[in-house]
Amino acid sequence: MEMTESEQDGAIIVEPRGRIDTNSAKPFGERVTALIGGGAHRVVIDLRQIPYISSAGFRSLLISAKMMDEAKGKLVLCGMSAEIRRLFEIGAFTDLFTICGTRDEGVAKTK
């Protein structure tokens, strides 16, 4: 899995590419929590290039969301495919995250 970071209107955009599975979930989660620990209070994770996410990936996202809540910031997910959205619904994660269709909507939700 590759990951890029950028900034848009004061929010950090994290865009992973590829599968978030057992092998990639740990470095993915470590990077997001490092951003939060480093003072990022507005983070958007753009999942449009993610074809699959495992339970380890969900765990990384949950840890990141908890850390962001403790930091009084905002973590938003965006760009999910229908299949990834279905996995979030099956796991009952849709109530635990702010989920937007587009990156621009996600950035707006971090304000």
Image (tube, rainbow, N blue to C red):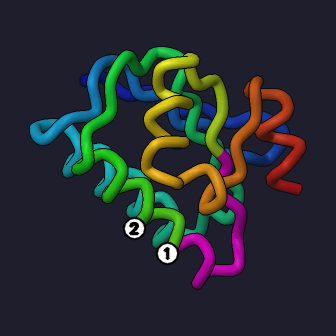
Contact between marks 2 and 1 (CB within 8 A): the answer is: yes
Magenta stretch in the rendered image: 67-76
Looking at this view, is 53 or 6 the one in front?
A: 53
Q: Residue at x 39, y 62 (%)?
A: 34
Which residue sits furthest left? 23
108 with respect to 55 (left or right) = right
Q: Residues within 10 Å of mark 2 (few under 14, many from 20)?
A: some
According to the picture, the residue beneath numbered tag 2 turns out to be 63
Q: Secondary structure at mark 1?
A: helix
Q: Residue at x 37, y 28 (%)?
A: 3
Residue 28 position within the rendered picture, expressed as x and y whole percent measured from the top left: 30, 44
Which residue sits furthest front? 90
Residue 69 higher or lower than 58, as above or below: below
Label for residue 11? none
Q: Secondary structure at mark 2?
A: helix
Amino acid type indicated by mark 1 = Met
Q: Residue at x 67, y 48 (%)?
A: 76
Residue 57 position within the rendered picture, expressed as x and y whole percent measured from the top left: 30, 45
Residue 73 position within the rendered picture, expressed as x and y whole percent measured from the top left: 70, 70
According to the picture, the residue beneath numbered tag 1 turns out to be 67
Q: CA distance from mark 2 to mark 1?
A: 6 Å
Residue 105 image-quadrant placement = top right
Amino acid type indicated by mark 2 = Ile
